[in-house]
Image: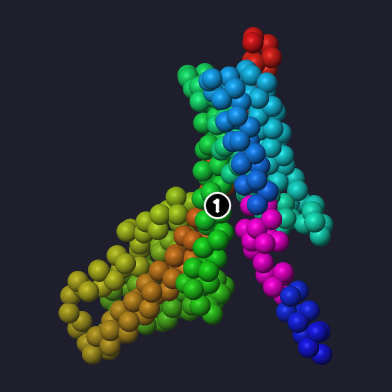
Amino acid sequence: MTQAGGHTERVRQRTHEGFLRHKGFLWAQVATGLCVVVIGVYWLTAIRLHEPPSGGSWLGYLLGTMGAGLIVWLACLGVRKRVITAGHYSLKAWVSAHVYLGLSLIVIATLHTGFQFGWNIHTLAYALMMLVIASGAVGIWAYATLPERLHGNRGETTRRQMLDMIESQDRQLHELAQPLDRDGAAVVRLSIEDTDLGGGFWKRLTGSYDDCANRRALARLRNLPSPTSAKQAEALTKIEQVMQQKAETLALARRQMQITAVLEGWLFVHIPATFALLAALTAHIVSVFTYW
């Protein structure tokens, strides 16, 4: 019974193991070992030649071939995500290798250049590669930290429940506005009809809702003339309470969408930069073998 329980626990730990820690940081060790070997060979070659090997040397060509092969393989992750497998070539293993071997490109490609940079297609390819790696690092940070913040922000409340709460609050506002005069009703209508929950990607990413209709409605509500009856006064008090509750619900939902936008947003840089890198890499290789 104890053995079965221990086996179940080990299976559970493997199931919940993140891609960064996959198989005890296997691919981190592989990438580190690769970098150590490459640096060692480069250093020994530099001592023998009495100068850093350039991209046109035998080592430069070797490192360039390794780097180009890695870039093409790394770009295939999008294709790999559409194939379901398990075991050694599971998606988790592939993503783990993608991360750590991608980082190893910093060493491999930099040594391939021989530290020679200029205003040309070769340096452009290197710069695009660094942009892809940097945006990928942002993606790693996002997936490693934001899901927990996403859960912490919403607690036990789902997105559907948040939307239902806002709809319920709007119905309450509509009912409470019945005794109000035209100006009071217009303020309530502003909150109900003009409140923008999401908006465009940039708005969701930055959380810029200074023009929130519910916020403006609250400000106008507090500046309305004194009510002419006790019924209107009671309605205005309740409306202010509901608008304040709605503001809190909106803030919660918008923070949720902001975190989701960050999770998605890095791809708007990473994917186009990857295609640009592949194009620049092709031009780099063609120009090398055509003109050098």
* Residue 275 appears in the figure: no
| Quarter placement of the C terminus | top right
Q: Is residue 275 left or right of residue 231?
A: right
- Relative to 93, residue 63 above or below: above
At horizontal 82% and vertical 90% (from top left) the residue drawn is 1
Q: What residue did someone put label 1 on?
A: 139
Could you say which is closer to the camera, residue 94 or residue 106?
A: 106
- Relative to 292, residue 5 above or below: below
Q: Which residues are magenta?
A: 12-28
At horizontal 53% and vertical 37% (from top left) the residue drawn is 130
Q: Is residue 207 left or right of residue 54?
A: left
Q: Residue 97 at x, y = what percent?
A: 68, 50
Colour scheme shown: rainbow
Q: Residue 127 at x, y = what percent?
A: 51, 31
Q: Is residue 170 left or right of residue 124?
A: left
Could you say which is closer to the camera, residue 221 or residue 123?
A: 123
Q: Residue 154 at x, y = what percent?
A: 50, 74
- Relative to 240, residue 71 above or below: above
Q: Secondary structure at mark 1?
A: helix
At horizontal 65% and vertical 29% (from top left) the residue drawn is 63
Indicate whether residue 15 is drawn in magenta: yes
Quarter holding residue 245: bottom left
Count the marks: 1
Could you say which is closer to the camera, residue 221 or residue 200?
A: 200
Indicate whether residue 43 is drawn in magenta: no
Quarter holding residue 58: top right
What kind of residue is marked 1? Gly
